[in-house]
Image (spheres, rainbow, N blue to C red):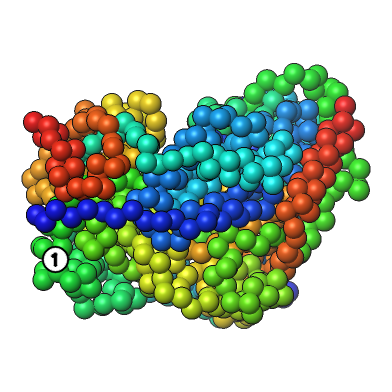
Amino acid sequence: MIEVLDGGLSSTIQDDGRFGQYHIGMPPSGAMDGFAHRVANALVGNDADRATIEMTYGGCDLRFDENAVVALAGAAMDGDLGEESIPMWESVAVDAGDELSLEFATTGARTYLAVAGGIDVEPVMGSRSTYTLVGIGGHEGRTLEAGDRLAVGDSAADPADLAGRSISDEHVPEYDETIRIVLGLCEYRLTDDSREELCSTEWKVTPEADRVGYRLEGVELDFEPREQPFGAGPDPSNVVDLGYPVGSIQVPTKPIVLMRDAVTGGGYATVATVISPDRDLLAQCRTHQSIRFEAVSVEEAVEARRRRRERLAEITEGLQ
Amino acid sequence: MAAERIAHKDLPEPRYEHGADDYVFVELDREMSFDANFRSMAITQEIAERDLAGVEEICPGNASYLIRFDPEELAPDELVERLKSVAAETDITEYRWETRVIDFPVLYADEWTHETVMNFRENHQDPEATDLEYSARINGFDSAEAFIDAHSGAPHLVTMMGFVPGLPFCFQMVPRDRQIEVPKYVEPRTNTPSRAVGYGGAFTAVYPVQGAGGYQLYGRTPIEVLDVDQRLPDFAESIVFPQPGDVLNFRRIDREEYDAIREEVEAGSYEYPIKETDFAPEDFFEAPDEYNEKLLEGLYA
Amino acid sequence: MTTHTIEAPMPGVFYRRSDPDEPPYVEEGDSVEAGDVVALIGVMKNFYDVEAEVNGTVTEVLVENETEIDAEAELLTIETD
């Protein structure tokens, strides 16, 4: 078992996500930065879908009741394991009784702690991911608090073989400030100027940006005037309520990028979608950080997705 | 009542739009109509039946639908081609489905949503009125009472699920000139009680859980649309109760009945009164009021 | 006597009070003990307690209430005895 001594600012248990339920209004949840989550799992010999602890801005303090192998990936976080400082992107052996104490993230927003065997909570609808709005998944459907006790799953590998593994520096991502998008969905609603401004503006991440959505500050975008269609409602930002892709950008007037715990549909015009590999990068953008959107084609988006998958495969193979 | 029929709507060419690498959004029409919705339901059912490799989520919408897929298994353009061929082969004049006609009790003008409505007055279109009074006025009703009579006077079809788990978007089963239409809040509320019954655009929504919201609020239901612990008998199969294609009959109840039903819900023993029947769109279009009456027949026996 | 500066560990919004109707946690001239909450930082609708790390006297509050701040922003100074 792992005992939570301090849950940090906002830490939840996440896996790859809860898919197949979007049609009932259930967002996928799951690790906001799927790349870091998967690398952390790979470092400790886990399959990609094992659950990790996602820590946002502030790290947790944990006490291990049993020997374990752990790895940190994602936002850089200083911390101590017993008397030693703990490295990022490297697997580390933990002795029963050790305490792990993590500080604040210094670059990036989210750090993943993987444990060999995975955090073992009861799956809900096929996933261990926490979805706090309705209180399901993870540990009691909520963020971690002091006193919580987390079980660790069985690891197929011998712990002696797992510690001390790291990934090469070239695979450690740089948290870039350019986020690639594909324009589309209800993008016809924007004026030509606003469509251009979406990609030329330096957008600032607001303090509210969280697992539900990244609200951005910049310019106000304008809509083409029209007689609103029946059922949409009179505001120019309104459309007849429709499904929102994860990663889509809706524009009440200033953009909100929908993240992994977002609403699945509604009546705001969506004008573009962040490509799947860059959703990981956006999840590492911090409050007050500036970002830019770069419009790419669907083909480029698929190519970037393929590269991400191949890179993860290369990392995993390199560790075996 | 006058023998009104619902005119078919000629739908425009659908728009196939890419949501980055892993979504395709298909807009069947920009405005809401039964035709667009029945087409969304028929096409998405057909896509599900074809069981296309690479398709991961199929989400019918009010007048659109959304597909999530793996573009490395099924190329985006290839998917769009498949969707177009499904569309070409789907004819909704022959489309029928088994529907559930469901009694849906609502305490209109309840104290909880009233308090919420009054707490968010400063940003409302009409700060001097309640949401019910405002909606009544802009839709040409003499009073909130008359408005409630209209809202509960004909059943509503669940045309989409979403926003949050269990939330049904419902479109009233009346001709266009009797459809209620209202704006959403100027600024979304930061709070809405759970089980609130609200309205935005041309849709009624039932909020499963407490949270943000932008619909005009009219009342509260004692029954659940989401039960994550699956305690209630009607949730044995799924954590959410409504499904697209269900017919909800919003029935005005008083506080006494609200409390009595709420007690049953909390005890885990409440069961939705449901009548199962076939839904025949053409008969509905031809004589909606008569058809609705027939749908409700026996529900309250 | 040494001056100790408290820095923000993360970006967010700086709050001097727990609630707009409450008095500030500390005013200049107040004496504080290590572990006392002296301010809050709000981010993602969560609030982090900024605590004094030393015993001493608050000499200066460097940031206005409800200002957006970055990580490592200097928040207030405490002079130790």
Mark 1 belongs to chain: B
Residue at image position (64%, 37%) is A16
**B115, above or below B37, in the image:** below
Residue A154 seen in render: yes
Residue B127 sits in quarter: bottom left
For the image, the number of numbered tags is 1
Instruction: Locate residue B262: give its quadrant.
Output: top left
Question: If the image is split into quadrants, where does the C terminus of chain B sit?
Answer: top left
Q: Which residue is rendered at x = 44% and y = 67% of the image?
A: A238
* Residue B169: image location, x then y, percent: 35, 50
Q: Residue at x 23, y 63 (%)?
A: B177
Q: Secondary structure at mark 1?
A: helix
Toward which corner of the image does residue B146 lie, by quadrant?
Answer: bottom left
Q: Nearer the viewer, residue A78 or B256?
A: B256
A68 on left or right of B219? right
Instruction: Indicate the position of residue A243 as horizontal and vertical percent values.
Output: 49, 51
Q: Quadrant of the N terminus of chain B?
A: bottom left
Q: Is residue A226 above or below residue B297?
A: below
Residue A109 in view: no
* Residue position for label 1: B144
| A16 or B55, nearer to the observer | B55
Q: Which residue appears at 75% of the width and 48% of the height?
A: A302
Tell me the crowding category of disc 1: few under 14, some 14 to 19, or many 20 or more residues within 10 angstroms, Cα based: many
Residue nearest the viewer, comparing A133 with B77: B77
Image height of B159 relative to A175, above or below: above
- Residue C78 lies, in percent from the top left, at 64, 73
Residue type marked 1: Ala
Left or right of B176? Residue A271 is right
Question: What percent of the width, then of the height, locates residue B154?
Answer: 18, 50
Residue A52 in the figure: left or right of residue B170: right
The residue closer to the viewer here, C76 or C29, is C76
